[in-house]
Every structure is written in structure tokens, then in C-alpha cells.
Amino acid sequence: MDIWDSSLIKPFDASELDERARAWIRDKGQELLDLIESVKPEPSPKQPFKSQRQSKATITSDDIVGEIVSSYTDWSGKVIGRSFFKGGIEFRIYGDGYLRFREISEAIGSKNPFRHKISQEFCDKAIFLWCTKRLKEGDLSHLDELLIDEAEKAVQDFTIYCPLFGIEVESDLILGDIVLAIIPESVFRPTADDASPDMIAGLAEMSKSYANLTAVQFSCNTESGLAEELVFEAAELVCSILRFISPASVSHNVAYPCAPLGSEQIAKGTTIYVKDSRVSLLSNGLRNRGLFNWKLSHAEIHNLMNRPMGNAFAFLENRKLNEFQGCLKRALLSYSRGVGQFDLHERLVAAVGALETLFLPNGSDGTLSTVGERLAFFVSDRPDERKSIVKNYSYIYKIRSKYLHHNVSVKDEIEMEKFFRYVWRAFYLLLARFGKYHSHRDFIDDVDSTKFGVALENGK
């Protein structure tokens, strides 16, 4: 979804659903009802053995508010079916029927006024709620009426903060068209309506955890589920650019796991030492080291903005990119994913993939030597260094298929450090020429003309 779409800030307008669309939705509602099957409830699967772990919490009937919503999920947590119970019988949409349910839900969700206002999950739940009300409670309302009613209740103006890990700014600033803000302590202050001791204590704990953290600030007029998807999308994009412009970007082994708070990849390890059948030592510690907190000052931001690297902020703007710029964005985001990795192999795969995106039009035009040579002739004008770059790329391409961990050879370390500096130089020069090329082929032709020492015409 386009996080800058103007529809995201406009109020929900039910009148956008015309009579033709309403009739179509009502027709699909009947098709959905026909997909529901009744089955005898199956007993819960028996556990293979009783766990010896102590329970940290117990849920009782008093903890359940409202009616239980049942769903089937696969091992990844993806919903693959929904159900409700009536008179000891389970009514469900499952298997191929649920695939059809999702197709209909996607089609409904793509129509105005639901598009850009509700998430797909919200749409799925609302549609199944209608099915439940119709078959369980005998509700005679039409599907379009319930969807409008549920959306009108849920859609509202939101200002959302998504805290980020690994970054701290002096004060609020704007990167491209995205606001990077410091979460104010004032949002956690209780009001007269929050005067209960539990609420005051809860807000105080939230303030300790989140006040003054650096966050992406996002505003929209949607339901909460879509608002969350949008702010995470904006935050992921910001983190990608921050990883790329960070000092870790030029290194082969310094990771910068900047990410939305809670999704950062910081591996920790626990070891329990036993001596004479008793615990003698318990050790907790980080498995990897990296750039875990970058204090980005206004002076540093100003310096970056006035250098070629500052053009990377264009990818945070509401602007139309040409073909070359779109290619550069894809390559940069690929490289940035590697900067956030502690695993050297993953880092190499991301960097090599970024180069292939840049130097192989359409992902298939060329060989190993083509990428190395184009990289060499693009980043250097010295024959001896060009030869070294081609040799280095060939070496890196080979060790990319090896298992790499912390204990790599000295030669591997030296070659990887060289390689990442070459890649960084390529991005630096590409960003310096951000407005020079209109198409990917324009860029490739320019590189090849330097490589062959002749002016190429029409890509020949």
C-alpha cells in the first residue's frame, strides 16, 4: 500500500459505495453462506506428554470478554479457516471454501469506501461476523450494511508512534516526508478520567518504557489494524535508509540492527554451569556485537543531506521514481537488509544481490565476470585497481556459497572488507548521479561505454 496516498487521511464516506456495488456485495454474501459447512466438533488433540514446566498464568472464564472467536491456523499462524458453534455443532469455512472466502473478502476490501480504510484482517472478521449473525442469531441485515456499520465505528483519526531500536535523535525531524519524533512524556500523563490507581500506575510504567524514545510518527484516518500496518511499513522503510547511511554500512562485520522496537535481531545466549550436581554459574550475554545505538545529531543529518548519501532520503518522499531510481531503491533496500544482519553469509548474499540488481538489467543479462567488470569500471578509473576489484568480486562470489561464521580466515576478512568498501563506493556514486539517468539501460550503457572505451548507441 502507498503510505502517502491522500485517501488515508480523508474521512470514511459510506456514500462511495454505490447501489451497483451494494448489490454485488449482497450477492457475494449469499455465496459466502453457501460455503459454510456443519461438522461434529472434534476433541482437542491429546498432548504427547505432560509438561513439567510451571505455568506462568492461568486463564479462567472470568477473563473472557464477549464471545470466543474460533479460527484454524497453520504452523506459521496464518488463518486457514473460521468457525462458530451452535447447538453443539461447529459451523465453519475451511479448506478450498476458505480460499474462496478470502478471494471474495479481498475483492470487497478493494472497493471504495473500504479501500485505504480497513485492513484485510478487519474485512475478513467483519464478513465472518455477518455470517455468524445470519446463521446463529437469525439477523436479517445485508452484508453491505454490516460492513458499513462496522467500518464507521472503527475508522477514526489516529496519530501513531512506532518506536525504533538503535537510533536516538536530538529533537523531532523530517526525513523526506516521514516524521522521526521523540515520544513526548505528556502522552502518558493521566487525565481526570484515568484517576484510578491501576491506570495511573500503568501509565507510569509505559512512560518509563517508551517516553523519549525515537519513533516514526504517522497520522491517518483508518481503522486501527490498517493504521498499525501503515506505521510499520513507514518504520521499516525509515530503518532501511538509516541502516544504509549508518557507519556500519561500509563494514563487512559491524551490524546495525535498526528496526521497529521489539523486532531487532539481538541474539542472546544462556549457559548454566553445573558442578557437583549443583548450579555453579549462570551466564547471560550477547552472542554478537554491533552498532546498537546511533546518536544522530542535527549536525550529522545536515552533513548527510548536503552530500550524495543524502539523496537516499528521496526514497522517503512522496514522489514518482523513474526506472533507474526505482532500480537503485530496490538495490539499496537489499543491501540495507544485509547491514542489519550479524550473519556474514546473509550479509554477503544481500550485497551480491544488490550488485546484480544494479549491474544486470532484468536480472539475466550477463555473467559473474559482467558484474565484477561493471563494478570495477564504475567505481574506479585506475587499471590496477579495476583488476583488483574484478579479482575481489570473483573471490567473494565463491566464498558466498561457503558456511561463514565468526571464525573466518584472515584472507576472507581482508577480501570481505575490500568488497564492502567497493559496494559502498558504488552506491555513493550512484546517489551522486541520482538525477542523471532515466532508465536502467541508460546507466548500463554509460558503464559499458567506459568499459569498452567507445560511445554506445541504442544499447549496442
Image (cartoon, grey):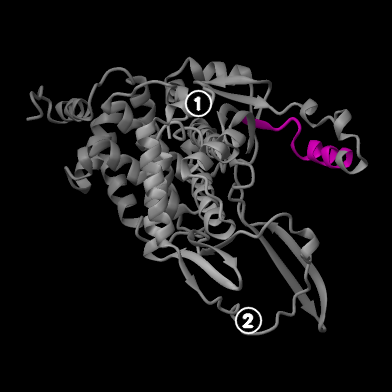
- Name the residue carrying label 1: 13
Tag 2 residue = 47
N-terminal label among 2 and 1: 1
Image position, residue 283 (x, y; %): 75, 64
Q: Is residue 418 visible?
A: no
Q: Which residues are magenta?
A: 200-216
- At x 32%, y 30%, the residue is 326
> Which image quadrant is residue 198 in?
top right
Amino acid, disc 2 = Gln
Which quarter of the rendered picture does the N terminus lie within? top left
Q: Main secondary structure of the magenta part?
A: helix
Q: Position of residue 177 (x, y in %)?
A: 50, 21
Left or right: residue 51 versus residue 378 is right
Task: Using residue 78 as the reference point, say whether residue 45 is left or right of it.
Answer: right
Q: How many marks?
A: 2
Other residues around mark 2 within 10 Å, as few (<14) / some (14–19) / many (≥20): few
In the displayed structure, 437 sits above or below 388; it is: above
Between 345 and 167, the residue placed more toward the observer is: 167
Asked which secondary structure carries label 2, the reply is loop
Circle 1: residue type = Asp
